[in-house]
Amino acid sequence: MPTRPVRLKRSSRRRRRSGRKNTISCAGSRAQPGSRPWHPTARRSPTLRGMPRRHDGSGLAPPLRSERDAGEKPQAKNEQRDRTMKRMLNGAVRGALAAAVLATTVSLAAVFPAAAQVKKPQDVRIVFVTHGQANDNYWTVVKNGMKAASDALGVKVDYRAPETFDVVKMGQMIEAATASHPDGLVVSIPDATALQGPVEAAKAAGIPVVVIDSGEDQVKPWGLDLFVGGGSEYQNGLKSGEILGKAGVKEAVCVNHEVGNVSQDQRCQGLTDGLAKTGGKTEVVAVTLDPTDATRRIEGFMASHPNVDGMMLLGTTLAGPILQMLDERGLSGKLKIGAYDISPEVLDAISNDKMLFTIDSQQYLMGYLPVVLLAGKAMYKTLPTEPVRTGPSIITKAEAGAVKQLADEGIR
């Protein structure tokens, strides 16, 4: 006769997997040593953790307050709560700062399945060629963003730029980059006439081209892929002129440290037109990034133009030496000064009322975002179809202190 299969008892391990952490004792049975009877209403409220517990006939009863708890003053409880909230908020702020740049660029691997990748991250190579001079702080921040994105995604990046402003040398670097067949090319276009040939040749070779910082007007006519950067340089200059005009400036000097860069010319022209709205006028002084040479030229200009009462710096590299020179000559209180971009020196000057404002294009994102977007293009054939704006924003005394720490870290 066939034997009936033997049904095994469920093990205690399976019972533990059913979702109950504590041993459940049925009526009339004895619970395991060290366990507590379970009751469906006995879940702890987060506000009751750490308080004494007691049993009644049906299980766990509400906690009893001890004599110490009963005599606790509301003020002490509020202070403890405030300390806890402060720790939580501090943690949240630190987390928000760490995630600020990543807010719009989540990890590509988390968005797309690995099976859909055309290329692996370690096989992607992106080349930057910009006009950024070696001693220009602005481009140091761009490179910081580029490296951060490379480290986050695991793609290869290569940054190239002439030691000094030289569009001919820059064109040669673009041609060399094209010959190496990267998965993406990131360029600035300070001079369209000099760089049109090399940039269009890169696109004709099938290389996706993203333009940063300057050259937005060339993206569509040349058939390039995307622009990542601040707004119109002329509009930024117009805004700076309006701000200086409202501050009472009648005669301003525009300090141009990159003669031949069309973007700088547009900034000075915008400044001229913006200041003209309140009856002011502008002169342009050409300088180099050599602090001694630059301060000498500005000092000479100020001596021959005693009515100058405003100044616009087109970058931050010379801000420290120029402000020091003005202090030594007793002129800093006379001038209303604005600038482009951010540095610790500029933010300190704004906080100390030695400067009015600076125009921030968030160039860290100009380094970070192209790496993320071109990696997406190489790995998943995705790319935005409209310009990606990183600015501008106007930084005044009200915002300078909050931005200072990020500037010290090379992010702003």
Image (cartoon, helix red, strand yellow):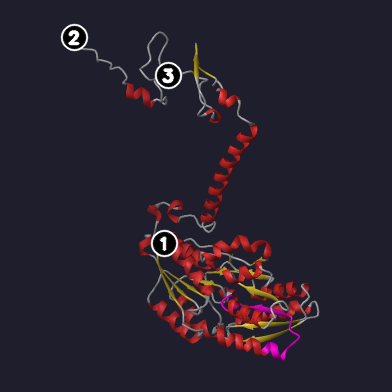
Whole-Å distance between the Cαs marked 2 and 1? 71 Å
Is 412 or 145 nearer to us in this picture?
412
User: Three-letter amino acid code at disc 2?
Assistant: Met
SS for callout 1: helix
* Highlighted magenta segment, given as a residue range: 301-318
Q: Residue at x 49, y 55 (%)?
A: 106
Is 192 or 56 nearer to us in this picture?
56
Mark 3, residue position: 36
Give the class, few, some or many, for how many residues have Cα within 10 Å of label 2's Cα (few <14, many ≥20).
few
Question: In this picture, is 148 found above or below 346?
Answer: above
Is 85 or 134 nearer to us in this picture?
85
Q: Quadrant of the N terminus?
A: top left
Q: Quadrant of the C terminus?
A: bottom right
Mark 2, residue position: 1
Whole-Å distance between the Cαs marked 3 and 1? 51 Å
**Residue 198 spot, x, y in % from top left:** 47, 81
Q: How many marks?
A: 3
Mark 1, residue position: 151
**In magenta stretch: residue 74:** no
Q: Residue at x 43, y 81 (%)?
A: 173
Is 228 or 256 nearer to us in this picture?
256
**Residue 326 spot, x, y in % from top left:** 66, 81
**Residue 370 spot, x, y in % from top left:** 49, 66
Question: In this picture, is 164 found above or below 343?
Answer: below
Give the class, few, some or many, for how many residues have Cα within 10 Å of label 3's Cα (few <14, many ≥20).
some
